[in-house]
Amino acid sequence: MSRVVNAFEPTKDAIFGGRVVIFQPPRGKGYRTNVDALLLADFASSARSVSVAFDLGAGVGAIGLSLLWLGAAHQVVFVELDPVTAALAKRNLEANGWGDRGEVIRADVREVAEPRRGAANLIVCNPPYVAPGRGRVPPAEALARSGEVEIFVRAARQIGGRHARFAFVFPASELTHLLATLANSGLYAKRLRFVHATGDVPARIVLVETVAGRPGGLSVLPALVERTESGYSPQMLEIFQREPSSRSSAMAPAARTLR
């Protein structure tokens, strides 16, 4: 198993009821996986399984790992620039028994786009959502949260094959910017779902699936509410506990469940 050589010891967390292990930086030492990764993976997994998926800006790999667990992709390529989180993504693949079903590329997404042109059936991305100079970002999370979404959209468009699907998670308040950026690359939304922290507040994030082609034919799914007065909503609990219809890989060791 590969090890991360760094000043901190990663925490061992887990998703899907402890069945998928996630090693990640301790709090305050780097960008940590949050529930958005599971929401995007669940959203992108609604269609039939694909042969190759790419996770752009993968971090420690939570979205791609979720795709493997859910049976949404046979192979996942994780593209991550930061050397520490890229090493953790590789460690997470091995810890879950998926070393032969994943590839970690430590590079800028722009460097990967041309040599992997047309390689993917599905591209998932939780892109940086704070434009450079527009907001405060904790230094430990700057690489993951600050950047230009246009870079990720253009890279995704190149990597996606002719009939590829592209799934993004983005702040709901910036939806118009995301849709305009996608359209500039010839990608148009076909499915969209708003996610609300509670039922009485504006949407927190939006999940968007796009394809290359013409505008129109957008399906707006029922909103997802994360919490009720008694805790997580039934819809969220279903996502946390999702089981694939079948899986061939070994079950991962239990760890503290991440929510």
Image (tube, rainbow, N blue to C red):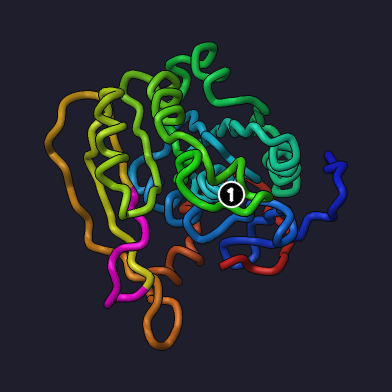
Q: Which residues are magenta?
A: 198-207
Q: Report if residue 72 is visible in the image.
A: no
Q: Nearer the viewer, residue 160 or 16?
A: 160
Residue type beneath disc 1: Ala
Q: Residue at x 45, y 34 (%)?
A: 148
Q: Residues within 10 Å of mark 1 (few under 14, many from 20)?
A: many
Q: Which residue is situated farthest in the top direction here? A: 115
Asked whether residue 245 is in view, the answer is yes
Q: Position of residue 71 (x, y in %)?
A: 49, 45
Which residue shows up at 38% across the image and 75% down it?
234
Give the image location of residue 170, x and y in percent. Answer: 39, 48
| Rendered-image quadrant of the N terminus | top right
Position in image of residue 127 (x %, y %): 47, 41
> With 72 as the anchor, is 115 left or right in this view?
right
| Quarter of the view holding residue 190 | top left
Q: Quadrant of the C terminus?
A: bottom right
Between 30 and 226, the residue placed more toward the observer is 30
In the image, 139: left or right of 239? right
Give the quadrant of residue 105.
Answer: top right
- Circle 1: element type: helix
Q: Residue furthest left?
A: 216
Q: Quadrant of residue 167?
A: top left
* 80 relative to 254, above or below: above
**Residue 163 is inside the magenta segment:** no
State the image coordinates of residue 139 (x, y, percent, origin top left): 66, 49
Extreme residue toward the front, this view: 133
Say which residue appears at 45% left-offset and 45% top-offset: 134
- x 31%, y 54%: residue: 173
Circle 1 sits on which residue? 62
Does the stretch in magenta take in 200?
yes
Is 118 positioned to the left or the right of 215 in the image?
right
